[in-house]
Image (cartoon, grey):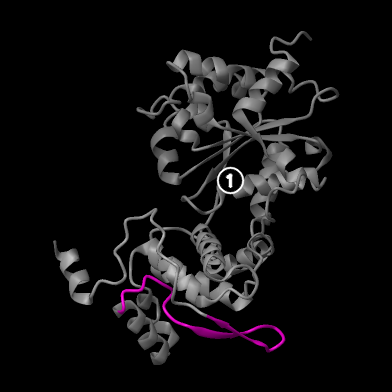
Amino acid sequence: MRLKVTDEQLEEGIHRYCRDLTYLARQGRFDPITGRDQEILDSILILLQKGRKNVMYLAPAGVGKTALCIGLAQKIVNDQVPDYLKGARLLEIDLPSMAAGTSGPAEFQERFMPIVKGVAERYHMPDKYPKYILFMDEIHTIMPSCHGSAYAGLSEVMKPYLTVGDLHVIGATTREEYRIYFEIDEAADRRFQKIYLDVPTVDETHNILEALKFGYEKHHKIRIPSDLNHAICNLTQEHMRKRNQPDKSIIVMDGACAMHVLEHGTGGELSLDAVLYFMSTEVNVHPTAFLDNRQDQELREAATARSEKGEASYPYEREVKDDRGNTDYLKMGHKVKKPTRKNVQTFNQSDEEMHDSKGD
């Protein structure tokens, strides 16, 4: 069989416009994926089929659709998949990079076609080439009905290969966007089997953070207590309702660690104070708004006193004991300033000023 897309052309397209998740997993670039074993197993089951062997992940933003693909890539590189998928390459197509610098849809399709066609041509050559699995996040944007998208219409390029079964594709989008843009194309819809991802509970999110924390401890060089991870999950669940777990808890854990390192340097133990301060910059409220459940009036008063002095700092000093019972006094309350990436209210405003600014 003569290939219309040479090996060099295919590899060039993959190098420029794809992220090889299996290669990155083999290099140990990803944190462990936990809590999604059943969904990964369901994905493998679909990919093994002869007919409808394409997967569609449907979930709200921040729930972990891309993480699910990373978990699948880790299974592949660890040979924890059936023989049919061993050695497979899981490629995430980077549509924004592919569209960058193009003058129109025709030029965009010229970049897209060699990857799709090259992968499809090699589907029936398992002795010479590995199985290729293409992952496309926000897959609804390639549908013709998604007006305004730079990628609208790319589904027509893929559809012939999906129809004859020469592609393995994993798509990801939200249920609402799938219903509006994807489901109306019955020919495309028939080629995919849907996997619904539920938002993790607080306990499930805590398990995810516990699995991830080693990587963050290694990066920030501080210790993250298990009970503090649980507090992060509870606080984000209560006060960051517009975002989904586990994404919001991971963001807070990472950001709070960075805050701690900025104030104290590496070493020691992450405290709840850093968590509260980072959360206050995320949701644009005073740190004391999170203290209702702590039932510690002295700490509340200390935080208020610092705020009245005009110090944009951690709310208070707190005594922390390490695993050996040694006391480590974390001096919260000087030097650290708020991140400027968000236009948050300054914490040295009086309550009256805060009230007046909301009323304008």
**Total numbered circles:** 1
The structure residue drawn at horizontal position 50% and vertical position 49%, both measured from the top left corner, is 59
On-image quarter of the C terminus = bottom left
- Considering only vertical position in the picture, is 200 above or below 97? below
Quarter holding the N terminus? Answer: top right
Q: Which residue is mark 1?
A: 66
Q: Secondary structure at mark 1?
A: helix
Residue appearing at x 33%, y 84% in the figure: 305
| Residue nearest the viewer, comparing 7 with 75 | 7
Residue 250 inside the magenta-drawn segment: no
Q: Nearer the viewer, residue 110 or 326?
A: 326
Instruction: Residue type at mark 1: give it.
Output: Thr
Residue 189, image x and y in percent? 51, 32
Q: Spot the residue most to the front.
A: 335
Q: Nearer the viewer, residue 300 or 82?
A: 300
Magenta residues: mostly which secondary structure? loop
Q: Name the residue located 65 percent from the left edge and 61 percent from the top edge.
A: 212
Most extreme residue toward the left is 360
Residue 234 in sight here: no
- The residue depicted at 62 percent of the width and 21 percent of the height is 116
Query: Which segment did they paint magenta?
Result: 309-330
Give the x, y percent position of residue 138. Answer: 49, 38
Residue 324's place in the image compared with 22, above or below, is below
Residue 231 rendering spot, x and y as whole percentages? 52, 75
Label 1: few (<14), some or many (≥20) within 10 Å? some
Judge from the rendering whether residue 74 lies leftward or rightward of residue 228; answer left or right: right
Vertical order, 282 against 310 (above or below): above
Q: Position of residue 226 (x, y in %)?
A: 63, 75
State whether residue 210 appears in this view.
Answer: yes
The quadrant holding residue 223 is bottom right
In this image, 111 relative to 298: left or right?
A: right
